Image (cartoon, rainbow, N blue to C red):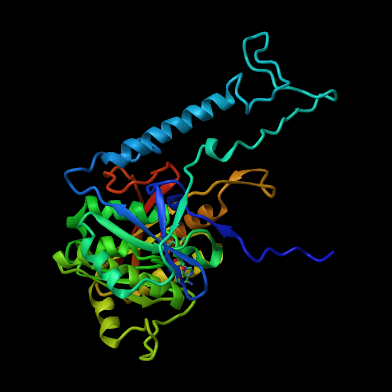
Amino acid sequence: MDQITFHYDTVLSDVHLLLPNSCHLMARLNSVGQPVFISRFRILWDGAKQDTCDLGSPCGGEELDRDTQEEKGRGDARGSETGADGDGGADGGADGGEDGGVEPPLDEDGDLAVTRRQSLPRMDRDRDVVYPIILSQARREEEEEEEEEECPRDVIRIEHTMATPLEDVGKQVWRGAFLLADLILSQPTTFRGATVLELGAGTGLTSIVMATVAKTVYCTDVGEDLLSMCQKNVILNRHLMEPAGGEVRVRLLDWLRHDLCTDADAEFGWTEDEVADLHDNTTVIIAADVCYDDDLTDALFRTLYRICNNLHLPCTTYLSIEKRLNFTLRHLEVSCEAYNHFRNCLCEMQELRDGRTCFTVEQVTPSFPQCLLYERIEQLELWKVTAVPV
Ligand SMILES: C[S@@+](CC[C@H](N)C(=O)[O-])C[C@H]1O[C@@H](n2cnc3c(N)ncnc32)[C@H](O)[C@@H]1O
């Protein structure tokens, strides 16, 4: 029999699925026919920000109260599902054993009897329902400009798509982008005036936040469509970057290529001056949620190694990663292969002795305050790689 191939592995980021927006505005269709939405993410600047929250409890503001309540409601709902009388329990099973514990329901052969829970009516499900609002497929430029003027200084507006095939995941916003954004917003002095490179920037959210403090941010990724969306987001958020004089330059940087694209005709190509600036002045590299495929992770680390070797100054790289646990038949247990591969790559980098650059790796505890609303789950990690020329 022919092997079955799934052409589309569609994924949807929790950022868009759960929090922080109660509705999503569909603005247009992009050049490949995908609906593009605009989300507004509120930054809790100094006054509003709070210390790190409990898992799943974003902090601050009215939205927090609403979301936290909803989160609590969900927790309660889950609790009752697993409770003795909950509808998720196996109906035929005994509620309590002789020792007071819960005995699993068994069928006549002694196998575990599992009763499938009936799907609940839509209103009762324990996730927020997303209501897309279709504004128009092609907005007039003046409308966009008007909106731009209205946008307050604590709101980042990001164009993104919703569920995408794996090759388009950069068109969504991922929690790792928020974690890095939080690091920047809570430690601005670390990044003030810096020249920064972002790898796999996707919609550009983290680069935009970085440009509120840094001098120049080279915001890089692959694919004209994605880079155009990212460029649009940079323009949408000029008002956040202008006060500090920061600038985001959206550029093509493909980990699978050995060189930077300096083709003058390429829309997101690099000028010779930019390449020189990158090599002479970069002290910070950031990359959010970029390790989800082993081959790409290898390519990313090769790129990181090559770039660091070409830098004239010591450089610190911050990598965020979400450990996405899955049950695999191969291991017969819950594991995250992409994460394990990432950790191996970090180890190899630290052990490198090439006489050119010395790399040190450490995990950063994300105990800095949360300035954006998202679930800072335990599986969301931050790693720091320091590269010093030998
Ligand atoms: C999961 S997304 C993360 C996007 C963004 N950093 C965020 O956290 O919202 C992974 C990103 O890696 C980028 N990527 C994948 N392969 C790449 C390659 N060969 N060169 C450069 N970027 C790549 C994707 O285009 C995508 O933007």
x and y, in percent, of residue 75 in the image: 47, 30
Query: Is residue 53 visible in this depiction of the protein?
Result: no
Which residue: 41% across, 72% down? 138
x and y, in percent, of residue 57 in the image: 36, 37
Rendered image quadrant of residue 146? bottom left
**Looking at the image, which is closer to me, 9 or 30?**
30
x and y, in percent, of residue 34 in the image: 51, 68
**Looking at the image, which is closer to me, 256 or 268?**
268
Which residue: 48% across, 57% down? 342
x and y, in percent, of residue 53 in the image: 32, 37
Tell me the quarter of the image containing the N terminus.
bottom right
Rendered image quadrant of residue 302? bottom left
Tell me the quarter of the image containing the C terminus.
bottom left
Relative to residue 272, is residue 355 depicted above or below?
above
**Looking at the image, which is closer to me, 293 or 18?**
18
Relative to residue 349, is residue 377 depicted above or below?
above
Task: Please indicate whether residue 338 sits to the left or right of residue 174 in the image.
Answer: right
Which residue: 61% across, 60% down? 9
**Looking at the image, which is closer to me, 336 or 20?**
20
Relative to residue 218, is residue 122 depicted above or below?
above
